[in-house]
Image (cartoon, grey):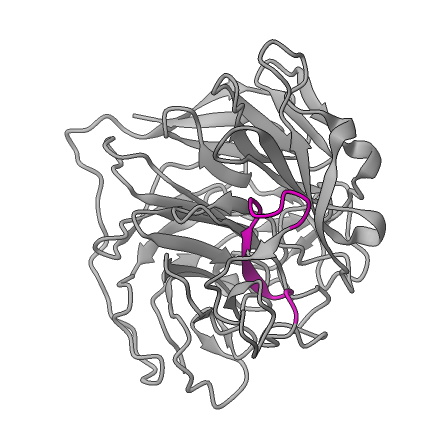
């Protein structure tokens, strides 16, 4: 049984932890430091990627067009580039970073900053403007996973792996303009911690939504095959995307007051459940784009309405468009695009929505840790098309100060998508 629609891919060779594998790894994971492997992980950490490009995919996608119980997919014609337009490409704007996993804007100047998995935030010139590596457990999939500024620009919020790898949400006061550091590392306030039963599937993104609440993506607790039973367990924040109020009390993270389970029936912080490892999520135009890392077969992108919820993305019953645990007859949100392990995928890297109005005008871009190709999804039509290839696989796609898509690569470069 299948649901959703698929970006089909063919032929690849992966080098993993100095060993060569076929194109169907046993499982997949969020981006990790190239030389490290997470304990309790259900997978190897990809260390090298073949420079030989795979054949172009034949994309098919149409949001919501498939009945999740029907076993059929709706198909759309692939979108081709406008022949009159300049070809897309990637321009290096900075190099020399160590495991760059996210970007953010300096709330004082608007400058682009780069978040490193090891616990540092650095400017494009390499200057370290925040270093909390002394409290971050880094290695494998653990580390400083994301940093964002509050809408009023007075605090930085950080999502990192703390003591014993526990998920930690912390707040730091922003320092005045002209200070060498962007925030006071000694003024940390811990807003929330969540114990992690394994070292992988920590999720990643923290981002303020259009409703002013903080959205925080968490994985299912790690291991493999949802071994801790968190994917569809509403009593734990693991395996869920949280929706938090970090303004009502600056010393803690409270559930948004209209969250689905604030009156009981589940953890009051949960907004969306049924995710395995949503490494990167983002929003645009009244909807959220969730790129969820798969287990043995399928990576997926889902589009979720930007409302109060609740939402269910289907894990562990569904892995992308594949039924894992029968009967799989639920009405969980269907993916709008998938990547198959049989065709070379291993760990989906989402995602960024190009600013409007630009030549890409709200298109969503995603890639995969085991491939250098990038795909573009048109949210209005559901069409998915291959975009330009990166010179090196990415750990994340994000936006620069102008709303252009940037890629943060495993070899430490920051590239901007150009025409």
User: Where on the picture, by quarter, is residue 4?
Assistant: bottom left
Q: Residue furthest left?
A: 84
Magenta-colored span: 236-252
**Which quarter shows the C terminus?**
top left
- Residue pictured at 49% horizontal, 33% vertical: 407
Q: Is residue 248 magenta?
A: yes
Question: Which residue is nearer to you in this view: 284 or 124?
Answer: 284
Q: Is residue 142 left or right of residue 409?
A: right
Q: Is residue 344 above or below residue 282?
A: below
Question: Which residue is nearer to you in this view: 116 or 287?
Answer: 287
Q: Residue 187, position in %: x, y?
A: 75, 30
Q: Is residue 300 left or right of residue 64?
A: right
- Residue pictured at 34% horizontal, 67% vertical: 5
Q: Residue 158, position in %: x, y?
A: 65, 39
Q: Residue 197, position in %: x, y?
A: 78, 65
Q: Residue 320, position in %: x, y?
A: 46, 68
User: Where on the picture, by quarter, is residue 306?
Assistant: bottom left
């Amino acid at each position: 049984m299948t649901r959703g629609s698929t970006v089909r891919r063919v032929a690849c060779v992966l080098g993993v932890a100095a060993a060569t594998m076929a194109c169907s790894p046993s499982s997949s994971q969020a981006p990790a430091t190239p030389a490290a492997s997470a304990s309790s992980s259900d997978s190897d950490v990809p260390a090298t990627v073949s420079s030989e490009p795979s054949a172009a995919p034949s994309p098919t996608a149409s949001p919501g067009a498939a009945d999740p119980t029907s076993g059929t997919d709706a198909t759309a014609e692939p979108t081709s580039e406008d022949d009159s337009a300049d070809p897309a490409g990637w321009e290096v704007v900075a190099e020399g970073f160590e495991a760059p996993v996210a970007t953010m804007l300096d709330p004082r100047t608007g400058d682009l900053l780069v978040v490193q998995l090891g616990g540092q935030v650095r400017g494009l010139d390499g200057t370290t403007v925040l270093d909390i590596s002394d409290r971050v457990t880094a290695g494998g999939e653990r580390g400083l996973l994301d940093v964002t500024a509050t809408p009023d620009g007075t605090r930085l919020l950080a999502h990192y792996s703390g003591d014993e790898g526990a998920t930690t949400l912390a707040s730091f006061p922003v320092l005045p303009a002209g200070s060498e550091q962007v925030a006071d590392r000694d003024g940390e306030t811990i807003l929330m911690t969540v114990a992690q039963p394994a070292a992988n599937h920590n999720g990643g993104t923290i981002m303020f939504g259009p409703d002013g609440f903080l959205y925080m993506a968490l994985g299912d607790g790690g291991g493999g095959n949802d071994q801790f039973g968190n994917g569809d367990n509403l009593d734990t924040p693991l395996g869920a995307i949280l929706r938090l109020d970090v303004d009502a009390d600056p010393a803690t993270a409270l559930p948004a007051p209209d969250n689905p389970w604030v009156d009981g029936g589940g953890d009051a912080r949960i907004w969306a459940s049924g995710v395995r490892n949503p490494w990167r999520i983002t929003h645009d135009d009244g909807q959220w784009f969730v790129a969820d890392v798969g287990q043995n077969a399928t990576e997926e992108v889902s589009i979720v309405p930007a409302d109060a919820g609740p939402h269910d993305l289907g894990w562990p019953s569904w892995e992308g468009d594949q039924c894992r645990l029968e009967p799989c007859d639920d009405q969980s949100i269907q993916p709008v695009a998938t990547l198959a392990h049989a065709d070379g995928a291993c760990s989906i890297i989402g995602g960024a929505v190009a600013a409007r109005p630009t030549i890409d005008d709200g298109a969503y871009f995603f890639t995969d840790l085991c491939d250098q190709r990038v795909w573009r999804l048109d949210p209005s039509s559901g069409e998915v098309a291959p975009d330009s290839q990166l010179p090196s696989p990415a750990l994340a796609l994000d936006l620069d100060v102008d709303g252009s898509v940037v890629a943060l690569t495993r070899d430490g470069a920051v590239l901007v998508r150009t025409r």
